[in-house]
Amino acid sequence: MIFPLYDNLEQKVPKKVLTIKQQQDCVSKLSKIDENGKELVYALILAFYLRENKDENLEKLPFDGTIDLVSPKLQKVSWNFEIFPMKLKHIIYNFVEMNLKTIEEDTKRFQKCE
């Protein structure tokens, strides 16, 4: 499976663990990313799972994820960040930081154009 975003983020995973503060920050910042960012987080989780579990069949959401029906056309997917492997936590943490920085830069750029 070719997923350049995942490959790039995976290369930046350090050997150390995320601090509790970093993990808490990541969870709180996840609510601030846009819908495209949330879809990419979902894709990153699936990509990690499929790469680490090559011989497993994906019959349900990995890492005990849940799906809640918000409306007939909208579903909310949730996970407990605590149970993710450390490598996946780093990937998500780095993505969220990158995504929020991009949103901030785009907002500043848009404000300058007004």
Image: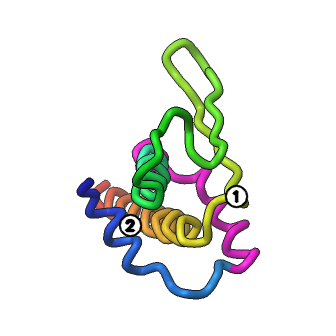
Crowding at mark 2 (Cα within 10 Å: few <14, some 14-19, many 20+): few
Q: Is 22 inside the magenta-drawn segment?
A: yes
In the picture, the quarter occupied by the C terminus is bottom left
Residue highlighted by disc 2:
105
Q: Tell me how far mark 1 sits from mark 2, CA to CA.
A: 32 Å
Q: Position of residue 55 (x, y in %)?
A: 42, 50
Residue occupying image coordinates x 47% and y 55%: 53
Image coordinates for residue 111, horizontal then vertical, percent:
37, 59
Counting from the top left corner in percent of width and height, residue 27 is at: 67, 59
Q: How is the image coloured?
A: rainbow
Which residue occupies the foreground of this view, 96 or 8? 8
* Residue 33 located left or right of residue 102: right
- Magenta-highlighted residues: 19-38
Q: Earlier in the sequence, mark 1 or mark 2?
A: 1
Q: Residues within 10 Å of mark 1 (few under 14, many from 20)?
A: few
**Residue for point 45% across, 40% down:** 57
> Residue 80 versus residue 73: which sits nearer the camera?
80
Q: Residue at x 64, y 81 (%)?
A: 17
Mark 1 highlights which residue? 83
- Figure check: 29 above or below 69: below
Q: Is residue 76 above or below residue 17?
A: above
Q: Residue at point 44% right, 64% down?
A: 104
Secondary structure of the residue carrying tag 1 is: helix
**Circle 1: residue type:** Ile
Q: CB under 8 Å between callouts 1 and 2?
A: no
Which one is nearer the viewer's eye here, 48 or 104?
A: 48
Q: Which quadrant would the N terminus be assigned to in this image?
A: bottom left
92 lies left or right of 68: left
Task: State the image coordinates of residue 110 (x, y, percent, origin top left).
Answer: 33, 57
